[in-house]
Image: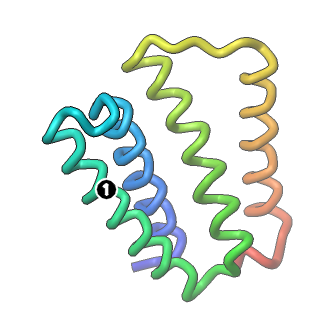
Amino acid sequence: MPPFLVLILAVIAETIGTTALQASAQFSRLWPSVVVVIAYAAAFYLLALALRSFPVGIAYALWSGLGIVFIALIGFIVFGQTLDLPAIIGMALILAGILVINLFSSSSH
């Protein structure tokens, strides 16, 4: 499997885990809590696999940055949470940083 795909799957697993964490109501609901544990285990396993091909700083920057943006979108769509303009600008800067890393840095290959 291509390393970038493994990293994207790690981000998706982390996003599922964080979404389930919100739904678990502080681990008071069983099935969302089970999803949290499984999704985070998968996320860290996949991140570990991605580290075979990416430097840790690059992998973690991509993993956490994309996770922040995805969770903010899910929070807005699923949980009705809103973001103010500074938060939106900050996330746009995170996405810009991810693009700069992937388009211009030789460290990400």
Secondary structure under the numbered disc 1 in the rendered image: helix
Using the image, determine if residue 52 lies above or below residue 37: below
x and y percentages locating residue 47 in the rendered image = 49, 72
Q: Residue furthest left?
A: 31
Using the image, determine if residue 41 lies above or below residue 69: below
Image quarter where the N terminus lies is bottom left
Image quarter where the C terminus lies is bottom right
Using the image, determine if residue 82 lies above or below residue 49: above
Residue type for callout 1: Ala
x and y percentages locating residue 88 in the rendered image = 73, 23
Q: Which residue is drawn at 44% across and 11% down?
A: 80
Mark count: 1
**For this rendering, which residue is in front, 10 or 28?**
28
The reply, left or right, for residue 75 in relation to residue 90 is left
The reply, left or right, for residue 19 in relation to residue 102 is left
Q: Residue at x 37, y 59 (%)?
A: 40
x and y percentages locating residue 12 in the rendered image = 41, 52
The reply, left or right, for residue 31 in relation to residue 101 is left
x and y percentages locating residue 83 in the rendered image = 65, 15
Q: Which residue lies furthest to the bottom in this view?
A: 52
Q: Which residue is drawn at 48% across and 55% down?
A: 11
Crowd rating for badge 1 (residues with CA inside 10 Å; few <14, some 14–19, many 20+): many
The residue tagged 1 is 39
Using the image, determine if residue 89 lies above or below residue 43: above
Q: Residue at x 36, y 48 (%)?
A: 17
Q: Picture quarter containing residue 10?
A: bottom left
